[in-house]
């Protein structure tokens, strides 16, 4: 039987699932730190190839990491959820050597729609961006961790 988001080893199992089944998130290098119903916290160590021409973290990297946290948080309720839309506001740039912390938290959950706020900051607590995602909850069983 697969662990549930309330299980102590869920984050490790979800990390293994991401590594095996989500090649983009695996390439991105996200490290899951905590997962519980409606919540995900992950860390992204900044690598040199993640920088733009100004030597700062490319906005697409920040968005992609936030989207991964959003996806995990909205798929913790047993039904497959997919993103309907997302926006991001960039507040400060990420820098070389940063460990970016991304926290996705459920703000509202209804039968078919979930709304999530994703806060992105660096290791010093400097707020880098704010992401908002809206998810559609399908009637299909969640595929995350289904084969573990």
Image (cartoon, rainbow, N blue to C red):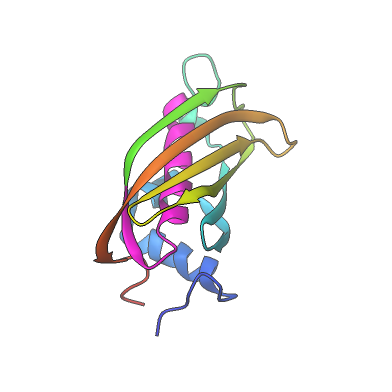
Q: Does the magenta stretch include residue 61?
A: yes
Screen quadrant of the N terminus: bottom left
Q: Residue furthest right?
A: 124
Residue 65 is situated, as x and y percent measured from the top left of the image, at 47, 41
Say which of 92 and 116 sits in front.
Answer: 116
Residue 29 is situated, as x and y percent measured from the top left of the image, at 48, 48
Residue 54 visible in rendering: yes
Q: Residue furthest front?
A: 111
Q: Does 105 sit above or below residue 80?
A: above
Q: Does 116 sit above or below residue 23?
A: above
Say which of 123 and 118 sits in front.
Answer: 118
Q: Does 66 sit above or below residue 1?
A: above
Q: Quadrant of residue 85?
A: top left
Label the magenta part by its dominant secondary structure. Answer: helix
Q: Which residue is drawn at 56% across and 51% down?
A: 42
Residue 148 is situated, as x and y percent measured from the top left of the image, at 36, 77
Count of marks overlaid on the render: 0
Left-right relation of 100 to 113: right
Q: Quadrant of residue 33?
A: bottom right
Q: Residue at x 46, y 25 (%)?
A: 59
Residue 31 is situated, as x and y percent measured from the top left of the image, at 54, 54
Residue 29 visible in rendering: no
Say which of 96 and 65 sits in front.
Answer: 65
Left-right relation of 111 to 4: left
Q: Which residue is drawn at 57% across and 29% down?
A: 129
Q: Is residue 52 magenta?
A: no
The part of the chain drawn in magenta is 59-82
Q: Residue furthest bottom?
A: 1
Q: Does 43 sit above or below residue 60?
A: below
């Amino acid at each position: 039987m697969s662990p549930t988001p309330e299980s102590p080893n869920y984050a490790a199992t979800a990390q293994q699932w991401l590594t095996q089944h989500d090649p983009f998130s695996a390439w991105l290098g996200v490290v899951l730190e905590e997962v519980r119903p409606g919540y995900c916290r992950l860390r992204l160590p900044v690598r040199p190839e993640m920088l733009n021409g100004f030597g700062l973290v490319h906005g697409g990297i920040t968005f992609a990491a936030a989207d991964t946290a959003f996806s995990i948080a909205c798929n913790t309720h047993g039904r497959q959820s997919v993103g309907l839309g997302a926006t991001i506001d960039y507040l400060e740039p990420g820098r070389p050597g940063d460990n970016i912390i991304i926290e996705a938290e459920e703000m509202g959950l209804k039968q078919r729609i979930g709304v999530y706020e994703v806060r992105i900051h660096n290791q010093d607590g400097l707020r880098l961006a704010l992401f908002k995602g809206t998810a559609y909850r399908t009637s299909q069983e969640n595929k995350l961790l289904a084969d573990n």
